[in-house]
Every structure is written in C-alpha cells, then in structure tokens.
Amino acid sequence: MEDDVFSGLANSQQIESKVVQAFQKSFVQVQNILDQNRVLISEINQNHESKIPDNLSRNVGLIWELNNNIRRVVDLYTDLSNSFAKSMEATSEGETKSDGRGGQKRVRSGN
C-alpha cells in the first residue's frame, strides 16, 4: 500500500515535470511569434503611411504572414490547453489510485 503511494507520487512528479517543460517550450514559441508579429505590424503601418504603391503591394504578403502567425499561436494555445487537460486527468487518476479508494475515478461536477 505504501509503495503504491510513493510510486503514484513519483509518477505524478514526472508527469508534472514533462508538462512544465512542454509549457515552457510552447510559451517560448508563442512569444517568438508574437515578437515577429510586432515587427510585421510595424512594417505594415510604415508601408501604409508611405502610400507608395510598391510598399502597399508588399503589405499583402506581410498581412498573409501575420495571419498565418496568428493561426500558429492559436494552434499552440490549443495544444497547450489539450496537454494541460490530459496532464490534469493523468494526475487526478494517479491520485485516485494511490489514495486508497481502490482505483475509483473521481466524479467532477460540470461547472
């Protein structure tokens, strides 16, 4: 019984460590994309203010790039959300199995 508690805790800590590493990696990726977007927006604004036809034409490509970057950020946040939910589920299952309730899963309210 005591071994089950310790193995459950060790497993939970390993899961948490992996989750934290994945979150850090994803947040760095998101921040890099947001930094790129800041530069793109600045260039788009400068091109717009210049009213030079070539610069305005260039904005089309820059806006496409900005839009794709926004999609990437949304995808990263979606992946983060899914990973977080799975890790919480795994942690919850580990706690349930190691707390002496015979492996019964907790029932969560639908708040």
Image (spheres, rainbow, N blue to C red):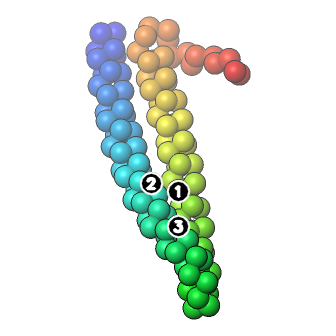
Disc 3/disc 2 C-alpha distance (Å): 16 Å
Which callout, 1 or 2, points at the residue further toward the start of the chain?
2
Query: Do callouts 3 and 2 mark residues in contact (Cβ within 8 Å)?
Result: no
Q: Secondary structure at mark 3?
A: helix
Which residue is located at x 46 percent, y 58 percent?
Answer: 34
Q: Say which amino acid is labelled 2.
A: Val
Vertical side of 26 occupied by 20: above or below: above
- Quarter-wise, where is residue 6 in the image? top left
Whether residue 103 appears in this view of the structure is yes
Q: Secondary structure at mark 1?
A: helix
Q: Nearer the viewer, residue 75 or 16?
A: 75
Q: Say which amino acid is labelled 3.
A: Ile
Which callout, 3 or 2, points at the residue further toward the start of the chain?
2
Does residue 9 appear left or right of residue 37 in this picture? Answer: left
Does residue 60 appear left or right of residue 39 in this picture? Answer: right
Query: Do callouts 1 and 2 mark residues in contact (Cβ within 8 Å)?
Result: yes
Quarter holding the C terminus? top right
Name the front one of labels 3 and 1.
Answer: 3
Does residue 85 appear left or right of residue 27 in this picture? Answer: right
- Give the percent coordinates (x, y) of residue 84: 49, 37
Q: Say which amino acid is labelled 1.
A: Val
Quarter holding the N terminus? top left
- Give the percent coordinates (x, y) of residue 71: 59, 61
Task: Read off the residue under disc 3.
Answer: 41
Task: Read off the residue under disc 2.
Answer: 30
**Among all residues in the image, which is located at the extreme bottom?**
54
